Image: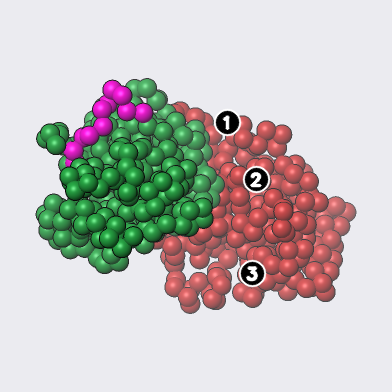
Chain colours: A green, B red
Amino acid sequence: MADLVKKATRESYGEALAELGDKYENLYVLDADLAGATKTGIFKKKFPDRHIDCGIAEANMMGIAAGLSTTGKIPFASSFAMFAAGRAYEIVRNSIGYPHLNVKIGATHAGISVGEDGASHQCNEDIALMRTIPGMTVINPADDVEARAAVEAAILHDGPVYIRFGRLAVPIFHDKDTYKFEIGKGEQLTDGTDVTVIATGLMVYEAIKAAEELKKDGISARVINIHTIKPLDKELVVKAAKETGLIVTAEEHSVIGGLGSAVCDAVCDECPVKVVKIGVNDVFGHSGPAADLLKEFGLCSENIVATVKKALAEK
Amino acid sequence: MDELLKKQLQITACKVRMGIIEGVYNAKSGHPGGSLSIADTLTYLYFAKMNVYPDNPKLPERDRFVLSKGHTAPALYSVLANRGFFPVEELKTLRHIGARLQGHPDMKHIPGVDMSTGSLGQGISAACGMALSAKLSSYTYKVYAILGDGEIEEGQVWEAAMFAAHNKLDNLVAVVDNNGLQIDGKISDVCSPYPITDKFAAFGWHVITMDAHDFDSIEKAFNEAETVVNQPVVIVQTSTKGKGVSFMENQVSWHGTAPNTEQYEQAMSELKAQLAELEAN
């Protein structure tokens, strides 16, 4: 594959907010002393009066966002996934989710690709936590183009939205001129008949690479990008289950409660097929360069290829 | 305070207390003690202070109220019903299946409720968000919130306290209902939040104290609050948990217990006697 330009989706997040700030005057951005890292500093520079730094107090920040939203403002509460979804979970559930307020949560530094900061900051549980909240939309963009589109879609969506962004630069494989993003609609990237690889976030590009490898061995893999984990595009998932009879999910998240679990929930209802989950296997991460960690934890195209082959052999 | 207004407020507060007992009795559960301790303050806010519009509860110009100590919803519901947001008769449906009156305030379904609360420590943050929004957009509404004295043991309250002072939210008035009791006993025994006034002062708030069951004191405190600029205001009110029902007063056991039929009748007869006396004089 040709070398693609890489960019971290957290940067896409900050740039998209700054860009959309002109168009949406009721857009406000909140941060908890991490504006530099979440990249909302880009928005702050352009719209200082619409950026609110809440200090190192994520629980209060979520409540502030809730209060702002009751008056018609659209707040993006930003922090690392660990603190936005983890520390502030109960505030997100009770002060935002329960009253179904129009608050957007921009959670950066999700997953193991946080790298050197280690397990305390590598949040592999946020999707699981957020998708249990009734009415919460959960989005995990795969690249820059999708991340920017997701930010605007979240603004236009009435209700709470959790968007997950990464620290690591990842290849931009979508075409910004033609890509159409719709909340709740998966994207089928390749056709295939032997197996379906359903991926989310930075694992989508790994799935595309894996499908190309598998093709060389005569294996026809369908690749589906699920950017919206909730509400899940059940129709697309069930169709894939029916047509390929085998699903491998791939996510930079715990195998408990994330994309893999959501896919299992969907297929066990309507078309129970074998689902093999690739993700973080109920362990904590540790410090190290992101690229090395992704390989070590099997979050790479090589592991997708191996997993697919093994599952097909057992089919 | 004007004597006629005071009398009207005392009468209304008595009716609000009757609504609290009615609700909790019919629910067979709920929190009467802390509801009764804030009945006078809520009555003052909704009948003498806040700009509210029962026929148009979500009017953007309205003043906001957040019951951060959300478990005392029976008091909020009773004051809203008595103010005309919904029928007083509906108070009997508190906590029933299919009812709007949820165990804790639910802004999605109950007219006049500005924020869903119940999990302690969270309402004050939302109130700060509402006050900040007014500052950002030059709206003139005010935001009032009531917190429990036990509630301020929650760390989030102090995150909010820091935020409110930092952002100079002088359009925010928080009331701490200092009735001295929480579920496990006296707040001074459980995990003392005292000295409450000094803590808020240290966090940069303008601190006022008042007697929660004296409308002269209540009016004086809220009037002083209006004169404060560049600082959020906290009114620490000394109150009696269970106020107005003799056997509930200062009894921690009435924090979250509903009266049985006999107790209900005694409570209502006491309140009816208080009402009759107020109306006679």
Residue A176 position by quadrant: top left
Type of secondary structure dominating the magenta stretch: loop
| Residue at image point 39% right, 25% down | A24
Chain of the residue on which disc 1 is drawn: B
Residue located beneath label 2 in the image: B109
Q: Is tag 2's residue or tag 1's residue first in the polypeptide sequence?
A: 1
Q: Amino acid at mark 1?
A: Glu
User: Along the polypeptide, which appears first: circle 1 or circle 3?
Assistant: 1
Instruction: Give the x, y percent position of residue B7.
Output: 77, 49
Which stretch is magenta? A170-180
CB under 8 Å between discs 2 and 1: no
Q: Marks 1 and 3, Cα distance to the nearest angstrom?
A: 35 Å
Compared across the picture, whether B168 is left or right of B190 comes to left
Q: How many marks can you see? A: 3
Which of the two marks, 1 or 3, is nearer to us in this view?
3
Q: Examine the structure image and report whether residue B150 is included in the region drawn in magenta.
A: no
Disc number placed over residue B61 in the picture, else none: 1
Identify the subunit bearing mark 3. Answer: B
Task: Tell me what residue is drawn at x 60 percent, y 60 percent.
Answer: B71
Residue that mark 3 sits on: B256
